């Protein structure tokens, strides 16, 4: 699986405070769907989120999938707790 913030020869935009549009949306999608969907489906969601994220700075992410099976994250109680702690630290 290859995931890129933007297509070749295009600019990837970022907020100096919140980070790149791609990373912001990747984190949001992973938090919301990691237990519910395979990685390939979440990558499609990220691409759609990036496209709609900020019309002032048009962007599109890109991913390629050569996996022969679906990849699912195993979300544990510990990983959820760590995510909550990071959210608190980041504000």
Image (tube, grey):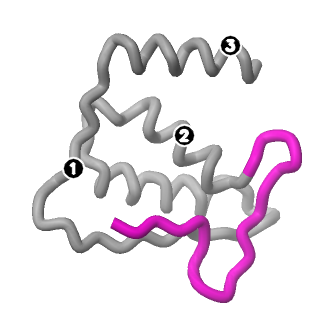
In three-dimensional space, the C-alpha distance between marks 3 and 2, rounded to whole angstroms, equals 15 Å
Give me the residue at 12% from left, 66% from top.
68
> Marks 2/1: CA distance?
17 Å
Q: Which residue is mark 3?
A: 88
What residue do we see at 58% from left, 46% from top? Answer: 25
Q: Which residue is mark 1?
A: 71
Name the quarter where the N terminus is drawn. Answer: bottom left
What residue would you read off at disc 2?
A: 27
Which comes sooner in the sequence, label 2 or label 1? 2
Task: Specify whether 85 is left or right of 82.
Answer: right
89 or 28: nearer the viewer: 89
Q: 25 left or right of 16?
A: left
Q: What is the crowding at mark 3: few (fewer than 14 residues within 10 Å), some, or many (at least 20)?
A: few
Q: Is residue 48 magenta?
A: no
N-terminal of the pair, mark 1 or mark 3, is: 1
User: What residue do we see at 28% from left, 30% from top?
Assistant: 35
Q: Where does the magenta region start and end? A: 1-19
Residue 31 drawn at (x, y percent) = 46, 31
């Amino acid at each position: 699986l290859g995931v890129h913030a933007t297509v070749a020869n295009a600019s990837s935009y970022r907020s100096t405070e919140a980070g790149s549009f791609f990373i912001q949306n990747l984190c949001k999608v992973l938090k919301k769907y990691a237990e519910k969907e395979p990685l390939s489906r979440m990558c499609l969601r990220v691409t759609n989120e990036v496209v709609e994220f900020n019309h002032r700075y048009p962007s599109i992410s890109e991913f390629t999938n050569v996996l022969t099976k679906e990849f699912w994250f195993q979300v544990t109680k510990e990983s959820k707790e760590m995510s909550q702690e990071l959210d608190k630290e980041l504000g």
